[in-house]
Image (tube, rainbow, N blue to C red):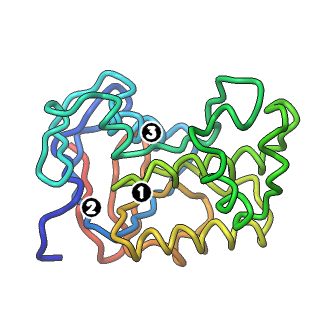
Amino acid sequence: MGERPVLKIRHLTRPGIAPLDLDLAGGECIAIGGPSGSGKSIFMRAIVDLDPNEGEISLLGQSRSDVSAPDWRRRIVYVPAEAGWWADRVAAHFDDPDLAAPLMVRLGLTVDALGWEVARLSTGERQRLAMVRAFLTAPQVMLLDEPTSGLDPEATAKVEAMLRERLDQGVAMILITHDATQATRLASRRFRMAAGVLTAMGDGGGGGGP
């Protein structure tokens, strides 16, 4: 890839994760597979500094240590498999519901859902609304943990179409998925994590263990 990586990770480690290095280019998606409990999610949490960790991470050449935590998590947005909800109503989770509405429609959601209580949302509705929240942040990197696991093929296709648009705009992505066909559709490189060790699959490079 000759250009400077958007995300550069060096010797990142924490309990459950072996030291690893990874470069991610703008407009690139890498997919990570592996068994449950192998360290995939805690790897993403380490990148956004949600858990104690060691190592050097930079975004467009700027060290994570030089950026406030809230700003870092806006620039690198993490969408966990189970997104957090801090208010009873859906609309309260959006600074500007009017901006959220067209994205919701594109993902097959009704705008009426803004007035719903979070408790009535299905798993798939929660996942798509979490994606809307992430898109509205306009991040430079997206960390996606099984973002379509609760969706049917039609809704999955809609989410993937919007992800491809962001890739075309230069957003970089790390995708955790157990769906090999989804990894093939979205990712240019594939990795596997087992017992906290990240290994490149095929001819791709950039990951490693101790």
Residue at position x 38%, y 72% in the image: 169
From the image, tell me which residue sits under label 1.
174
Label 1 is placed on what type of residue?
Ile
Question: Is 120 displayed left or right of 15 in the figure?
Answer: right
From the image, tell me which residue sits under label 3.
39
Label 2 is placed on what type of residue?
Leu
> How packed is label 1: few (under 14 Cα within 10 Å), some, or many (20 or more)?
many
Question: Is 42 displayed left or right of 93 in the figure?
Answer: left
On screen, 152 above or below 113?
Answer: below
| Residue 165 locus on image (x, y percent) | 49, 74
Cα separation between marks 1 and 3: 14 Å
Label whose residue precedes the other's in the sequence (2 or 3) = 2
Which element type, helix, strand or loop, lies under badge 1?
A: strand
Quadrant in which residue 14 is drawn: top left
From the image, tell me which residue sits under label 2.
24
Q: Nearer the viewer, residue 69 or 21?
A: 69
| Residue 106 locus on image (x, y percent) | 70, 67
Q: Which mark is residue 34?
A: none
